[in-house]
Amino acid sequence: MVFEVRLHHMGRFDRGLQYVGGEVHVVVGLDPDRWSYFEAVDIVKEFKYDGDFKLWWKGSREIMMNNLRLLSDDREAMNLSKYAEGTGDMVEMYVQHVPSEAEEVLFLSGGEDTVDGNMEGVAEEQGHPAKEHNDVEIGHEEDEVGEEEVQIAEEEVQIGEEEVGVDEEEVVIGDDEGSDSEEEVDIDESEEERMDNDDDGFGVEDDVRRNINPVLDRWNLMKRRKKRVTRRGYFHEGSFVMDDEVGEHEIDEEYISDELDSDLESDEDGSLKQGKLKKFRQDDMNKDFKFSLGMEFGSLKEFKNALMEHSVLNGKEIKFVKNDLTRVRVECKKKCGFLIMASKVGGKETFQVKTLVGRHRCGRVFGNTSASVNWIAQVLIDRFVNVANMTVNQIIDDIKKSYSVGISAWKAGKAKQIALDSLVGDGDRQYARLYDYVGELLRVKCGTFKIKVNQPQPSLPPRFGSFYMCLKGCKQGFLGSCRPFIGVDGCHLKTQYGGQLLVAVGRDPNDQYFPLAFAVVENECKETWRWFLSLLLDDIGGTECQRWVFISDQQKGLMTVFDEMMDGVEHRLCLRHLYNNFKKRFGGGVLIRDLMMGAAKATYEKEWEKKMGELKAINNDAYNWLIGIPTKTWCKHAFSTYCRCDVLINNLSESFNSTILIARDKPIITMMEWIRTYIMKRFASLREKAMTYPGVVMPRPRKRLDKEIEKSGNWIPTWAGAEKFEVTHGFTMDKFVVDLSNNSCSCYSWDLIGIPCRHAIAAITYKVQNPEDYVHLYYKKPAYVTCYAPEIIPINGQQMWPTSENTPSLLPPIYKTPPGRPKKLRRREADEPVSHTKLSKKHSIMKCSSCKEFGHNVRSCRRKKVFFF
């Protein structure tokens, strides 16, 4: 397969990256196997292009601005041929002229006295007689108009005895052959004016174009542009690009800057000019940064911060001699001669360095007082982006290692507080913007949100009371396919205002926690629990739509609320907290613990009675205490079956509280946003996992089913007819009745959970059926997909929150200091050892070594033996 190339040459690239002028030729029959960079060069040379040049290429359907590629080696030549073979398009190839050394020498010559001699040498090299230049006299007259405009000088062109004055801008540059084609006319902003002059007959373009040497024309243009740059300060290579030839150069970074105050500017004909003064940029600050006279700053604060950072990076101490609203004068604290002063520029909101004397000649200071609290806080903000938290000692070591500066523990702690406030927000401001936050949430309609305000008297400002949040996606997913089982719990907030976070957590089809609703309250009491549970029931439909099962520990006021307001709600107690209370009263122990757990886990009443009888024989008081607690709150055999859940411990709520532990020390909006974002990411992640899961039953229920399948081998089914079986244990006389049509077993386990028990699996295997077919829909993949199908709607940041009108700014709650000395250590469980190396004697029964009785030791024995001597 061969390809074609459309060759553009003898032209130039303009400022819009368009190739103008020149000629176009099409080269056909190019073989990709023989194509190389040198073949492309040979093709160009066939058109008598002997000078230095560069080759550029693109596809015929591609845009020049984004797809122009330099053809400089065989690798890029292979890319060109692959593109042509793959797309079948014609390749556009462009020839760019590179200035010769003679032209660069002419361009860099600075004096006007050397023009004639230089031009003679170049003219002779180009094959033109030197005498032709004697007919051309060039004179320059400069008329300065301001700092930003330079008048163009005039040229006098003598042709024979006739002298005609032509404005330099009207001299049209031709090619080496003196062509005056329309494509070679340089059109700029004054094109209409030149066209009018041509119509009036003042142009001598025919004679001028034929007699002026092309090299001279280019030199005139370059010299003209050079004058425009050098008059404004200084000239450096690569500061502008010629219209008729594009040389090899570097593009100044300032030229591609998006800032309005970029140091480089562009004049009317497209060439660049360098600004006089340098503006300070924070990104340039480093150890080797140098202040310069005339450097501009946006504010005095920016100037002072730059000085402080520079002094810390270099280990120098500075002293503010003058520091007011319009000027700052700083000198070295050790009087080494360094002095710098900046003040406001008249008529501008700009501050400029107007005095700069000497450099620091003093030694490095380790305990640098310039390392202020605010400067350390800025350093820590960057650290906290990657590190969740740092201790005070870690901050001290980090500053010492990174900047060779020693700071105190107080300064490190204060800087840490400022940095955290800057990152997570200030608590007072967040309470004041709580209505704006709720307004943004309501704007996108992503859930239910309520604010309760405390205002004892109308004359007093309102204070925060409580805040409730239930996301729409959580509510839809829970009502769509989760079991009607909810765990509620509360946890402390670790902020300066205290408070409690109340949470409601469901269980998804994979037996993992499913966040449902949250509330921030001042304290945990009967009123706050009633407020939270009332809003929660209103969100999920109330007790009229469906029966609900709640599980909780014996929280303050929670038991009373369940008894008062929830007649149609089943309430269970967390067995772990129940056992902790039991252990405090009766000391616990392995035997008593196993009997209590066995009674709670018994799925049918006779097994429960057996365990309770054994407990009564050991400790009658413990038996009476447990009998006084309703069995429907802690025993499986008394649980209802409609929720398909036999959970005894509220561990999922506590697991979720542990997950959000990192957010519980943050202000209210930051904390709620952390929780909302976490749920949003969790929904998205689990939604993707559900789509790729290959099974029918979710992994956790499947694991439970596999255990029952493993234990079903010792059970022998006997078919009783239809779908009923009598299942007998192979080594004991235990029997249970299984009804496959009703998904029921007399052990009550299948009815309670929804997953076939070992007895039911024995009967299912007898019928050569799959136990997965008898698992309840709550545990299958379609339910899981439905559960996480709703999306948690994203919201904008606080910079775009709507401003709430007619709503007062809330004050933070008043922190109430509890009585007594604050606790420094966490509460330990009743049976948790105090030491990991030595066993505690708590709850152990002492035995007297004197009287051999229990309950006391020899020191308190009343029957001490008396010895007579």
Image (cartoon, grey):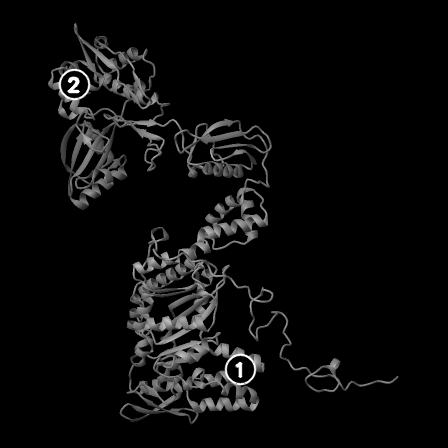
Residue 209 visible here = yes
Q: Residue furthest top?
A: 161
Instruction: Name the foreground residue: 287 vs 812.
Output: 812
Instruction: Name the foreground residue: 758 vs 765.
Output: 758
Q: Is residue 794 left or right of residue 843?
A: left
- Residue at numbered disc 1: 593
Are the residues at dot 2 and dot 1 in contact (C-beta closer than 8 Å)? no
Mark 2 packing: few (<14 Cα in 10 Å), some, or many (20+)? some
Q: Indicate the secondary structure of the residue bearing disc 1.
A: helix
| Residue 519 % position (x, y) | 41, 66
Which residue is depicted at the point 49% across and 27% down?
Answer: 355
In the rendered structure, which amino acid carries the disc numbered 2?
Gly
* Quadrant of the frame with the C terminus: bottom right
- Residue at numbered disc 2: 178
Instruction: Name the foreground residue: 649 vs 59.
Output: 649
Which residue is depicted at the point 43% across and 90% down?
Answer: 605
In the rendered structure, which amino acid carries the disc numbered 1?
Arg
Q: Residue furthest right?
A: 869
Residue 339, numbered circle? none
Q: Indicate the secondary structure of the residue bearing disc 2.
A: loop
Is the residue 664 above or below the residue 803 in the image? Answer: below
| Residue 425 % position (x, y) | 44, 53
Quarter of the image for residue 782 reads bottom left
Q: Is residue 332 left or right of residue 464?
A: right
